Image (spheres, rainbow, N blue to C red):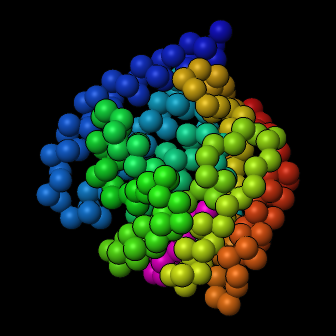
Amino acid sequence: MRSLLGSLAFALFQATFTFFFVPLALCLFWMNPIRRYRFLLWWPRLNLWAARWLCGIRHRVIGRENIPDGVLPHIVLPKHSSTWEVLAIPLLMPRPLCFVAKKELLKIPFFGWGFSLIKPITIDRSSGSEAMQQIYTQGEIRLKEGFWIILFPEGTRVSPGVKQRYKTGGARLASMLNTPVLPIAHNAGYLWPRGIFGKRAGTITVSIGAPIPSKDKEPHQLMNEVEQWIEDELARIGAPGK
């Protein structure tokens, strides 16, 4: 019952906060993209604060020493099992993140309008092989603007314990742009599953691996290294504790 009530309270908070936050954010369209991004981080920051106090969801970070200093561009490749990592990872990184996402997300009222302000790389999945060129073209621009790129190698949310093949898009992009990749593992999917309900109290562990260079590596080789590290780390950290 506590989990149900907490999930409902969080959903109401998120909907209400987003309703008022997005119109304010839209007024900042004129602002420098980096400064605007820093302001927009208040949306995930306050959502995570609400999740902590309403649902009892906390987190701890291991591998902070592996976070790059922000001088060189990186491509961030996290495990994708919930919405939690979409909110939390930008707050951990030293540079603004540019998400790679499908165009349809921009059509979602309020959320999509606000999401467009962080200058995501949007792709048309129906374009097939042209999607990679879309990512590369936009990615090169974003890196020059001071953003890092975040891309979920599995392509979609995958429930804990379910294995899905890692796609090579992130590794191909890293090779094309000659940037290292930063692998991230976490067990958020146990506490923050898909859907409005089901959130439960506990402590999420997020583990940040050492950057992996892309130079002189084939995309499949690079992605195999990323997948191996993430899956091994998931097995090591296990399910969240209380």
- The secondary structure that dominates the magenta segment is loop
Rendered location of residue 224, percent (x, y): 77, 69
Q: Picture coordinates of residue 161 (x, y %)? A: 81, 41
Residue in the foreground of this view, choosing between 104 and 239 = 104
Displayed quadrant of residue 52? top right
As rendered, which of 65 and 207 lies closer to the eye? 207
* Residue 95 appears in the rendering: no
Q: Nearer the viewer, residue 78 or 129?
A: 129
Residue at 26%, 63% in the rendered image: 33
Farthest top residue in view: 1
Residue 83 image point, x, y percent: 55, 40
Q: Is 19 on the left-hand or right-hand side of 140?
A: left
Question: In the displayed image of the protein, which residue is found farthest to the bottom?
Answer: 216
Horizontal side of 130 relative to 116 (left or right) equals: right
Quarter where residue 168 is shown: bottom right
Q: Indicate whether 53 appears above or below 214.
A: above
Magenta-highlighted residues? 68-78
Q: Is residue 149 left or right of residue 234?
A: left
Q: Position of residue 242 (x, y in %)?
A: 74, 32
Q: Using the image, determine if residue 208 lies above or below residue 115.
A: below
Locate the N terminus by quadrant.
top right
* Picture residue at 85% right of the left edge, 53% below the top: 236
Residue that appears at 45% across and 50% down: 102
Does residue 193 belong to the magenta stretch? no
Q: Say whether residue 69 is magenta.
A: yes
Q: How many marks?
A: 0
Q: Is residue 200 above or below residue 40?
A: above
